[in-house]
Image (tube, rainbow, N blue to C red):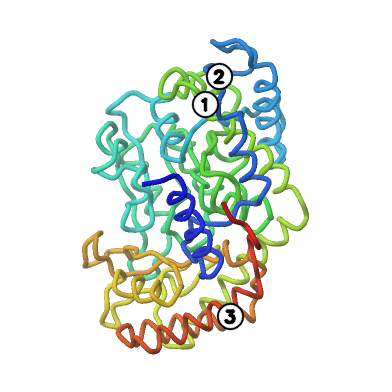
Amino acid sequence: MEIKEVFDLINQETDRQEKGLVMIASENYASLDVLKAMGTPLSNKYSEGYPGKRYYSGNQFIDQIESSAQKLALQLFGLDEENWHANVQPHSGSSANLAVYLGLLQPGDKIMGLDLGAGGHLTHGSPVNFSGKLFNFIHYNLDPETGKLDYAEVARIAETEKPKLIVCGFTAYTQQIDFVKFSEIAKANGALLMADISHIAGLIVGGAHPSPFPYADIVTTTTHKTLRGPRSAMIICKNELAKQIDKAVFPGMQGGPLENVIAAKAICFIEDQSEKFKSDQIQTVKNAETLAEGLKANGLNLVAGGTQTHLLIIDCRNLNISGKEGSNAMAEAGIYANANMIPYDPSTPMNPSGIRLGTPALTTRGFKETEMKMVADWIAQILKNPTDENLKKEIKNQVENLTAKFPIYPNLSY
């Protein structure tokens, strides 16, 4: 393969993102400034350690960038440095979560988290993941009738099991999270509370979802989903936990941090404090609600009956297709989503019964209620006729006509 061929593939992927409907709930469009920062010579610099305490020389400018990113992370959530600390070095949400577990607990300690099939994350105790292998995870689930959290049941399990840490914040849960109730449950049982807000961080900044601060002791989040930043993560914790968290990240888990990505985070945190970003978060939820209503009007079933956030999950069982069949058919029409388990799914994780849809990327493009109604109709048509090749071609053309009106990276090529 030649270098040009690699860039050709990059251009093809950029074109796919430009012409398609990106509805994977964990994906979004980073700004050109964020992308630019990731491609700078900061990538050349080793900076093991933390600002003012590096193992290599020549970090005077790197220190300023990372310190600024830490301060901006706290400002983003309205936090002060007297009580809170931000670590912006974790490479991903998974490594951020592992750092919390290893920094505050011992292998084998008991942790509570939401079951993967109900919307929890792999790092919330899945037996195939490091979290489930290293720690004793006890899982709570959703109410089988409502598809929502039953806080009384969560409290009962916590009282019985006495975990050292309770994890809330999820990857495929459609309803708002009551952090106050989780905090009360944690305190009543002598547990720390960790909120993984990777999916809803942007909504929280924009006031479209309740905040975990000051109720959680530790908050982890990715920076690329609703925050529209680079693919990375951060940890915010109470100051009394800062030394343990920092040591767990470095030298406990990582060597040199990715300072080009940390610079991109700083830019993201500045952008996210704008009024435009905040209003977009309100619109993201409105778009998800409009999408949900449109799908239901077309006879589709949704987990929990709808959404209060940026994502929703279609239960495909009444359509007599699997989530994978449905999401593959949508992709052929230029609409990208992911197959997803539903609560108490009778099928397997590799071929689940649901499809997860999200509205962050479409909102970033400028979509509003009018466009979401069109999208809902297209999705319903495809899922009801997943083998109709002519229909998929026709809808793909309509998708490309619509996305052309909402360019995201016009004239961008490599």
Amino acid type, residue under disc 1 in the picture: Pro
Whole-number angstrom distance, CA of label 1 to CA of label 2: 6 Å
Instruction: Classify mark 2: residues with Cα within 10 Å, few (<14), some (14-19) or many (20+).
Output: many
Task: Tell me: 241 left or right of 350.
Answer: right
Q: Tell me which numbered mark, 1 or 3, is placed earlier along the sequence.
A: 1
Q: Tell me which numbered mark, 3 or 2, is placed earlier along the sequence.
A: 2
Q: Which mark is residue 36?
A: none
Instruction: Classify mark 1: residues with Cα within 10 Å, few (<14), some (14-19) or many (20+).
Output: many
Whole-number angstrom distance, CA of label 1 to CA of label 3: 42 Å
Q: Which residue is mark 2?
A: 47
Task: Tell me: 17 left or right of 129.
Answer: right
Numbered disc in front, either 1 or 3: 3
Amino acid type, residue under disc 2 in the picture: Ser
Front residue of 16 and 224:
16
Residue at 40% over, 75% down: 330
Q: Is residue 280 above or below residue 250?
A: below
Element type where label 2 sits in the image: loop
Image location of residue 172, percent across then percent down:
42, 58
Which of the 4 image quarters holds residue 29?
bottom right
Q: Tell me which numbered mark, 1 or 2, is placed earlier along the sequence.
A: 2
Q: Which residue is mark 3?
A: 401
Image location of residue 46, percent across then percent down:
53, 20
Which of the 4 image quarters holds residue 371?
bottom right
Q: Which residue is mark 1?
A: 257
Q: Are the residues at dot 3 and dot 2 in contact (C-beta closer than 8 Å)?
A: no
Element type where label 1 sits in the image: loop
Instruction: Classify mark 3: residues with Cα within 10 Å, few (<14), some (14-19) or many (20+).
Output: few
Whole-number angstrom distance, CA of label 3 to CA of label 2: 46 Å
